Amino acid sequence: MGRYLITGSSGVVGSRCAVELLHRGHYLILFLRPRKSQSIEDRWQSIAQFYKIDKRFDSQVQLVQWEMSKKDLGLDSQTAQKVFSNIDGVIHAAASVHLNQTIEQARENSLESTKTLFQLLRRWSSPERVQKIEYVSTVGVSGRSSLPLKEEPVRSLPEFHNTYEQAKFETELFVTQSRREGWTVTIHRPSMVVGDSLTGAILSFQVFYYILDYIAGIRSNGWVPDLKEKTLDIIPVDYVALSIVESLLNPKSAIEILHLCSGPDQAQSLKQLQTRYRQFLQTHRISISSLKVLSPRLLRSLYQVGALIPFLPQQKKFRAALPLLDYLQTEQSFENKKSLQHLEQFHINLPDPNQYLDPILSIWMEQQNGRV
């Protein structure tokens, strides 16, 4: 039985990694933050209930309250020593995925917290004791570049869609430098994470689902951007979590960077996705507006104006749409051949979108109609 620390254990990826490790018999130290109405114990119980984790696993879990922005992650010296001096590996999945953060907030939640994590590792442990560190980044480190993102460090500073991407890019640079100290680290770059490839279930809905509603015209009374031949790379959460866990448990086969994405061959056509979702809604007798297509640039300009008008009922909706429209304006692709070859040794195969899209659409449709 190994002892593993997971940050971001209440998130979509971190929680799924925790479930996978528990079922393999490992002991977990889970960093959690309380909410106004929930203690960390309450939060974990909600997560356990979602994943149907049996009570018999309680003895394998230690919950630790932390705070990304505080000194020593909000841990007192005794707790920090106890945690960091006795772990075999780390999954660092904590992040704030809000797309409207200031750059200072984004850096605090990503770069600075990662620096502090490594400071605590240096203080209380060593590369010899901690066999492996998994850092969860994003394919978004390529920013607005239209060139395929290679499975290697990004060597030039791109232009970014948002501060989240920029902070992740800066954090990757720091993590790469940390390897020189002897730490064995894999950087994982997931694309847009969606629900389970078999059931469609997901702990919380992220960017993809809101993009889905916008291209289907649900959130815009039918006004949508011209999607042309653009594609979107999405990836099921079970594939992401399984890949990270196998990387953690097999430090001798470490690889520097893993692209956890569908890649150029399986990225989804946005037009086909739009048609499929609208047909899905109509099949379930859900009323939708007819589509009215505008150029992405013109639609963005209209939304920018709407977002500035005070007391406009749709002002919040316009503001929320702007970051999503940004993603739809740039054609991007992410290489994954090396990653697929690496994961083959663990019998991890890329899921087929034709198999998982319907369960994912179904779960989202039910959520929108208040049935889950």
Image (spheres, rainbow, N blue to C red):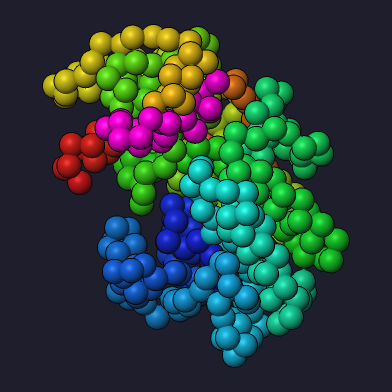
On-image quarter of the N terminus:
bottom right
Query: Is 53 colored magenta in this rendering?
Result: no
Residue 115 rendering spot, x and y as whole percentages: 70, 65
Residue 57 rendering spot, x and y as whole percentages: 37, 73
Residue 168 rendering spot, x and y as whole percentages: 65, 48
Give the mark count. Answer: 0
The furthest residue to the right: 180
Q: Quadrant of residue 197?
A: top left
The furthest residue to the front: 310
Residue at 66% in and 40% down: 141
Inspect this view and state whether residue 53 appears.
no
Q: Quadrant of residue 221?
A: top left
Q: Mainly helix, strand or loop, the magenta region?
A: helix
Is 144 above or below relative to 278?
below
- Residue 87 vs residue 290, the one in the foreground: 290
Residue at 50% in and 48% down: 97
Is 4 above or below relative to 167?
below
Task: Give the magenta part as a residue range.
Answer: 307-329
Q: Is residue 359 left or right of residue 257?
A: left
Residue at 86% in and 61% down: 180
Query: Is 323 colored magenta in this rendering?
Result: yes
Q: Is residue 215 left or right of residue 182?
A: left
Inspect this view and state whether residue 271 appears.
yes
- Residue 356 vs residue 313, the one in the foreground: 313
Residue 12 rendering spot, x and y as whole percentages: 43, 52
Q: Quadrant of residue 308?
A: top left
The furthest residue to the bottom: 78
Residue at 23% in and 37% down: 368
